[in-house]
Image (cartoon, rainbow, N blue to C red):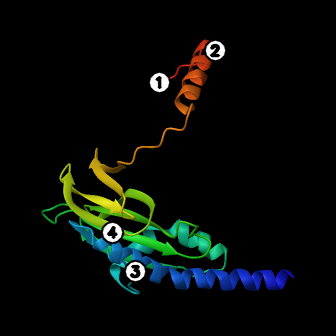
């Protein structure tokens, strides 16, 4: 039983990883059809300088996959984020059964600053496109055709508002009031 479960897990992981590029390509084609968006194309680039940087920047994820006896696929892409082309971004997606979930595999985005890379957007899932609109001198980023990220205070911030669950804000305010009564400082 244990052996068949392991075999099933390996086969299922292989199917997920094999299907991922096709599903990703289909979503990417849909996203690229958006007016004013340039899709970020991520490919496997073994032996390239960008792959070496991507592997160094994602060494923790690669080590986690290795602990599961996996050899992940590292997809990378690069594109200028500023309209003048001076701010180059590195897009990295590490694909393995243990690192990808039901939403697919996540992508990290790094910005080249001097001779090093700084993570400016962490773990977004879905196809990524660069919009022609800008905020703070950097292009807006669209993830999965509906999640817009804008440049603010040297990082990207999400523009999606969290949905308000009935009574959620009231519950938070009640909890904060109780904490204040107990002498805790609660930021406004």
Q: Residue at x 39, y 87 (%)?
A: 47
Distance, label 2 to label 1, CA atoms, is 15 Å
Q: Residue at x 29, y 73 (%)?
A: 32
Q: Nearer the viewer, mark 3 or mark 2?
A: 3
Q: In what quadrant of the picture does the C terminus appear?
A: top left
**To which residue does mark 1 refer?**
187
Distance, label 3 to label 2, CA atoms, is 54 Å
Q: Nearer the viewer, mark 4 or mark 2?
A: 2
Q: Residue at x 30, y 61 (%)?
A: 111
Q: Earlier in the sequence, mark 3 or mark 2?
A: 3
Distance, label 4 to label 2, CA atoms, is 48 Å
**To which residue does mark 4 refer?**
90
Between residue 152 and residue 147, name the one nearer to us. Answer: 147
Helix, strand or loop under label 3: helix
**To which residue does mark 3 refer?**
25
Helix, strand or loop under label 4: strand
Query: Answer yes or no: do the residues labelled 2 and 1 have beta carbons within 8 Å?
Result: no
Report the side of 11 relative to 58 (left or right).
right
Residue 153 lies, in percent from the top left, at 28, 44
Q: Residues within 10 Å of mark 1 (few under 14, many from 20)?
A: few
Q: Residues within 10 Å of mark 2 (few under 14, many from 20)?
A: few
**To which residue does mark 2 refer?**
182
Distance, label 1 to label 3, CA atoms, is 45 Å
Residue 109 lies, in percent from the top left, at 37, 63
């Amino acid at each position: 039983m244990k052996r068949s479960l392991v075999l099933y897990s390996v086969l299922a992981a292989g199917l997920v990883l094999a299907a991922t590029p096709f599903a990703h390509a289909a979503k990417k084609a849909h996203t690229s059809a958006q007016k004013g968006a340039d899709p970020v194309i991520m490919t496997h680039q073994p032996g390239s300088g960008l792959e070496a940087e991507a592997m160094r920047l994602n060494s923790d994820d690669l080590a986690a996959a290795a602990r599961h006896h996996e050899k992940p696929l590292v997809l990378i892409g690069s594109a200028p984020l500023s309209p003048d082309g001076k701010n180059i971004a590195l897009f990295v997606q590490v694909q393995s059964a243990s690192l990808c979930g039901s939403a697919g595999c996540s992508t990290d985005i790094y910005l080249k600053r001097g001779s090093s890379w700084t993570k400016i957007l962490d773990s977004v899932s879905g196809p990524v496109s660069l919009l022609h609109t800008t905020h703070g001198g950097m292009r807006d980023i669209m993830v999965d055709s509906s999640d817009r990220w804008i440049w603010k205070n040297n990082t990207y911030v999400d523009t999606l508002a969290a949905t308000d669950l009935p009574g959620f804000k009231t519950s938070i305010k009640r909890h904060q009031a109780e904490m204040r009564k107990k002498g805790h400082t609660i930021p406004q």
